[in-house]
Image: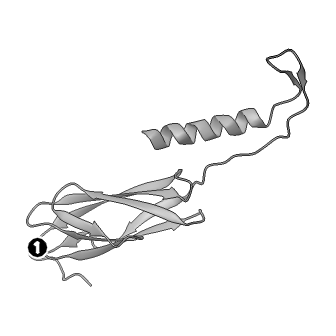
């Protein structure tokens, strides 16, 4: 939620900063014109690449793909069942014993602003192909 608030604050700042003119200081003096300053949040599309069906207890790799934004990025991965770990960058390895799960990733830019998020449903089945 803090990231949404930060993003909304940035968007409000961008709208307000462009419309500033001369004003009055708290001590009664005047303040000269303020130079407009555009502040924008990075927006992009995020997708998860990887298998949609996996075998039980087999570790499978997934990859977050970001388009329309410039890094560096920070990736926050989670899954609803099983275990997994991030490679510290855009990759994630997931394992589940028997439960289907949803894999989620949220991506932030270098300033901590949200870029986007994605989710992928993964089915666990003994007849699934082996992971690459």
Q: Residue at horizontal 21%, vertical 71%? A: 53
Classify residue 65 as left or right of residue 95: right
Q: Give the quarter of the image for residue 128.
A: bottom left
Secondary structure beneath dot 1 equals: loop
In the depicted view, which residue is nearer to us: 98 or 86?
Answer: 86
Any part of residue 50 in sight = no
Instruction: Look at the picture and state if 62 lies above or below 81.
Output: below
Residue 70 placed where, x, y %? 60, 65
Residue 74 placed where, x, y %? 46, 62
Q: Quadrant of the C terminus?
A: bottom left
Residue 87 placed where, x, y %? 34, 73
Q: Residue at horizontal 11%, vertical 73%? A: 57
Decide: few, some or many residues near mark 1? Use Cα within 10 Å; few <14, some 14-19, many ≥20: some
Any part of residue 57 in sight = yes
Q: Residue at horizontal 50%, vertical 63%? A: 73
How many numbered marks have been drawn onto this rendered protein structure?
A: 1
Q: Tell me which colouring the rendered structure shows.
A: one colour
Classify residue 38 as left or right of residue 1: right
Q: Residue at horizontal 19%, vertical 76%? A: 59
Q: Which residue is mark 1?
A: 57
Q: Give the quarter of the image for residue 29.
A: top right
């Amino acid at each position: 939620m803090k990231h949404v608030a930060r993003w909304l604050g940035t968007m409000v700042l961008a709208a307000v900063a462009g419309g500033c003119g001369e004003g009055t200081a708290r001590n009664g003096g005047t303040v000269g014109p303020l130079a407009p300053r555009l502040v924008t949040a990075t927006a992009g599309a995020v997708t998860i690449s990887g298998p949609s069906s996996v075998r039980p207890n087999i570790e499978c790799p997934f990859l977050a793909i970001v388009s329309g934004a410039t890094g560096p990025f920070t990736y926050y991965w989670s899954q609803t069942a099983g275990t997994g770990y991030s490679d510290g960058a855009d990759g994630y390895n997931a394992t589940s014993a028997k439960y289907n799960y949803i894999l989620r990733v949220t991506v932030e830019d270098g300033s901590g602003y949200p870029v986007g998020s994605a989710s992928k449903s993964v089915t666990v089945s003994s007849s699934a192909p082996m992971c690459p």
